[in-house]
Amino acid sequence: MELALEEKKILMEIARNSIKALFYDGVKPVDEKVIKQFPVLEKKAGAFVTLTEDKRLRGCIGYIIADRPLYKTIADAAVQAATNDPRFPELTKEEFDRIDLEISVLSEPFPIESYDDIIVGKHGLILTEGFHRGLLLPQVPIEHNMNKEQYLTSLCHKAGLHGNCWKEKQLNLEAFTANVFSENDLTEEEDDS
C-alpha cells in the first residue's frame, strides 16, 4: 500500500500515542477528524509495529491480514507490541521515551511455488506446516545480513521446526511485501522535502 509522507506521520503518531495512552491519562491516540481526511488510512491492511530500544528489539506484534481499518490495526499492534510480546516484559513508563517505532504495512500474502521466487529484502515470508507457523518481515534478513538460505533457516526456527527443514521439501510458503518506515525515516524524509 502506497502512503504519502503525511499519512505515514499520522500512522506513526497513532502508534506512539496508543502506547503513550497506557501511561498518561487523557492521551487520545486517534483524531477521527484527521482520519476522515485520508481515506487510505481507513482501508483494511495487515500491519506490524516494531519497538526497539538502543537499536535492540523490544517488541513486535502485528496482523498479517486485518479485518479493520489500517489506523485501528496500527493502534492495536502498537499496544500489543508494548504489552503482549511474549519474548519481553511489558514496556514501562520509564522506557517509553527511549523506544523507537517502526511500522510495516503489508500487502496481501501470495503463494511461493519455488524458493527461487523469494527476493531477499523485498519479500516477507509466512511458513505454515501443520500446526507450525512462522513469519519474518522483509527487513529482517537485511538487518541481520542474511542470504536466502539463512533467511529460510531462520523462518523454520521461528515456526518451531528444525532449521534445515526447507532443504527436505518445498515448504508451504506465502510471501508479502511491506511499506516499512520508522520515526527516523520520517524525520529524514521531512528534511529532504
Image (cartoon, helix red, strand yellow):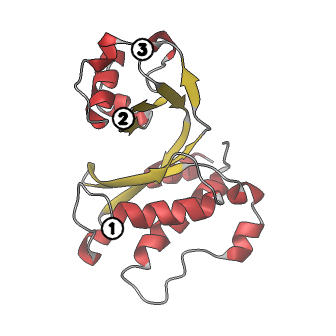
What element does badge 2 sit on? helix
**Is the C-beta separation of discs 3 and 1 under 8 Å?**
no
What element does badge 3 sit on? loop
The mark nearer the N terminus, 3 or 1, is 1
Q: Position of residue 69 (x, y in %)?
A: 66, 60
Crowding around mark 2 (Cα neighbors within 10 Å: few <14, some 14 to 19, many 20+) is some
Q: Using the rendered image of the protein, determine whether residue 190 is visible from the camera's viewpoint.
A: yes
**Of all residues shown, which one is farthest toward the bottom?**
25
The mark found on residue 170 in the picture is: 3
Q: Nearer the viewer, mark 1 or mark 2?
A: 1
Crowding around mark 3 (Cα neighbors within 10 Å: few <14, some 14 to 19, many 20+) is few
Q: Which amino acid type corresponds to the residue marked 2 in the rendered image?
A: Val
Within the image, what quadrant is residue 169 found in? top left
Within the image, what quadrant is residue 130 found in? top left
Does residue 29 appear to the left or right of 127 in the view shown?
right
The mark nearer the N terminus, 3 or 2, is 2
Residue at (43% x, 89% y) in the render: 25
The residue singled out by tag 1 in the image is 83
The mark found on residue 140 in the picture is: 2
Distance of mark 3 from mark 2, alpha carbons?
Answer: 21 Å
What element does badge 1 sit on? helix
Q: Quadrant of the N terminus?
A: top right
- 128 to 14, vertically: above or below: above
Q: Nearer the viewer, mark 3 or mark 2?
A: 3
**Is the C-beta separation of discs 3 and 2 under 8 Å?**
no
